[in-house]
Every structure is written in C-alpha cells, then in structure tokens.
Image (spheres, rainbow, N blue to C red):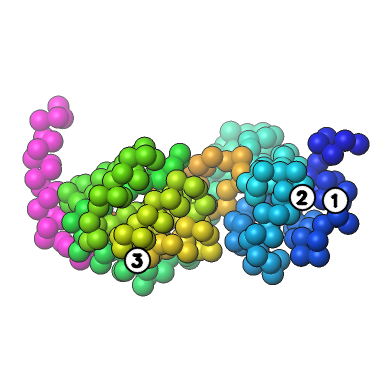
Amino acid sequence: MDGQNMNILERIHASYYHLTATERKVADFVLAQHDQVQFMSITQLADECGTAEATISRFCRSLKLKGFNAFKIELAKHSVSSSAHVPQEQSTDSLEGRCAEVGRLSIDAVRQTIDLVEPKQVLRAVEMFESAPRIMCIGSGGSMIMASECAHLFSTVTGKFFAVSDSHSQMSATATMGVEDIIVLFSYSGATTSGLQVLELAKSRGIRTVLVTRFNKSPAAKLADVVLRCGSNEGPFQFGSVPAKVAQLIVMDVLFQEYCRRNREESEENIQRIAAALSGKHL
C-alpha cells in the first residue's frame, strides 16, 4: 500500500523501525492513546512522552507531515466517525435527544472551566486591568470573536478596552503601546503564529499580557504574564466549537464580574451614562 494512502496509524507502524529511539517513544504513546492525542498541545504530548517538543516535530516530519497540527488532522481523519469531531449520526434520532447532547457538551465545558479557574490568576489579571491606561484584546479566527466580545463586555463599564482583529494591525499596535498597557490574547491552542508574534514583541518591550487558553503548557503560556484556562476539548476539525466558546465566555465573565465588584462606583456610573446615551436607540 502506498504510504500516502495509509491511515496515520498504519504509517506509524510502517515507519516504526526507521524512527530514532526518542521518536519511537512518541510512536508508542500515540499508538496507545491516539484518541486523546488529537486534543493535546505539542507541549502536552512532549511531556507525556518524556521528550522535547523538537522531537515531536521531527516525528511528524518522519511521517512526511508538515508539522504537529497536520499530524492531529490525520489522527482526526482516522477517528472521523466519532461524533466528538464532526456532526455524524447521533446516538439518538430525536431532535430532543440531540438538543440534550448539545446542552450537555456546553454544561461540561462550563464545569471544566470552573474547576480550572485559579483565583490568584484572576486577581492578578484584574489588578493589571485596573492600573492599565489601555487594554487591547486580540485573537485569530474564532478566538478573535471572543476577543471582540471581551472588549464589548468591558466597554459597558470602562473605556479602556478595545479590540484589534487584523494580525498586522495587532503587531503595529503592540509596537506603539506603552509599558503600562495590557494585551489580552484569546487562543484556545496557545500555538497560533500571529498570537506568538504579538506576545514575543510585547515581552521584548516590557508590555504585560494575559492569555485565555485551554493549555497551560503551550508556547503562548510560556510568554504570557497571566494564564487563564478554559475547559472543553476541541478536535482539529472543530474551528471554534460552541462549547469552547462557552468556556472562554465563562472566563471572560469571571474577569468582568470581579472587575465590577472591585470598581463598583465607577462601573455603575458608566453603566448609567451609557444607558442614557443609548436610550434614543430603542423604541
């Protein structure tokens, strides 16, 4: 069978004895835990295998793949019949049953996120918000929608927050921000190139950053000053799933509620001013 026509597990088996000793450790783990690996970050997999991230990258290239994300896509293709990745035949034929399953996934995302909330990290982030003149919210793809929502939510109580969607504009804004300003990055994977570029530039300029992510051991987490984790597992075929968005919204609301609690008088005054300004917009 041609290597390109093999599924990913067959390709690993076929290449096994051509791998280095450390790459075989990765192969052994993937063959035993392939259903879980597609939800991991490259750092998580490296930790589980007791290897370096560079070993994971070499392992992927040994399989003639461009990188780790391409590898996870191949794993997802192998398991594509599972409803955890793309909508397939559901366990129930009824609409009511499907609605219940959709609700369960979002409820699970909320529960996971609440379990992952670290009060000390939340307080650090809110204290940074309080002292910052400006707070830029950014992301890529579906995470940019969350960044825009964050800026909108906080705009109801303060004028500090703003969102920048274009990756070039994000870098330009970072290059001209002051050291007292804050950047909030939404990145489920913590491994998007545009997000990492912003964090690297911010770090070099002494600008503090807050990261909302699924993985506390991701490339972005190593650069951020504060890491806030969200729940919900998302496969490589899910480009911003609803449960993942729900999880990020919970983190966002926890930050918002704590900011309002600590700045109650200012928040209430701004809410009243905004309500008065918008009163003419409603019938």
Residue displayed at 15% across by 55% down: 267
What residue is pinned by disc 3? 122
Label 3: which secondary element: helix
Q: Which mark is residue 128?
A: none
Query: For the residue marked with disc 2, what is the amino acid?
Result: Ser
Residue displayed at 63% across by 37% down: 86
Q: Is residue 274 magenta?
A: yes
Label 1 or label 3, whichever lies nearer to me, is 1
Quadrant of the drawing holding the C terminus = top left
Query: For the residue marked with disc 3, what is the amino acid?
Result: Val
Q: Is residue 235 above or below residue 266?
A: above
Q: Is residue 272 left or right of residue 172?
A: left
Q: Earlier in the sequence, mark 3 or mark 2?
A: 2
Residue 58: quadrant of the picture: bottom right
Quadrant of the drawing holding the N terminus = top right
- In x, y percent, where is residue 66? 67, 43
- In x, y percent, where is residue 111? 49, 59
Q: Badge 1: few (under 14), some or many (20 or more) residues near its Cα, within 10 Å?
A: some
Res. 117 visible in picture:
yes
Residue 49: quadrant of the picture: bottom right
Look at the numbered discs 3 and 2 and tell me whether their residues touch, using CB distance below 8 Å: no
Q: Is residue 52 magenta?
A: no
What residue is pinned by disc 2? 62
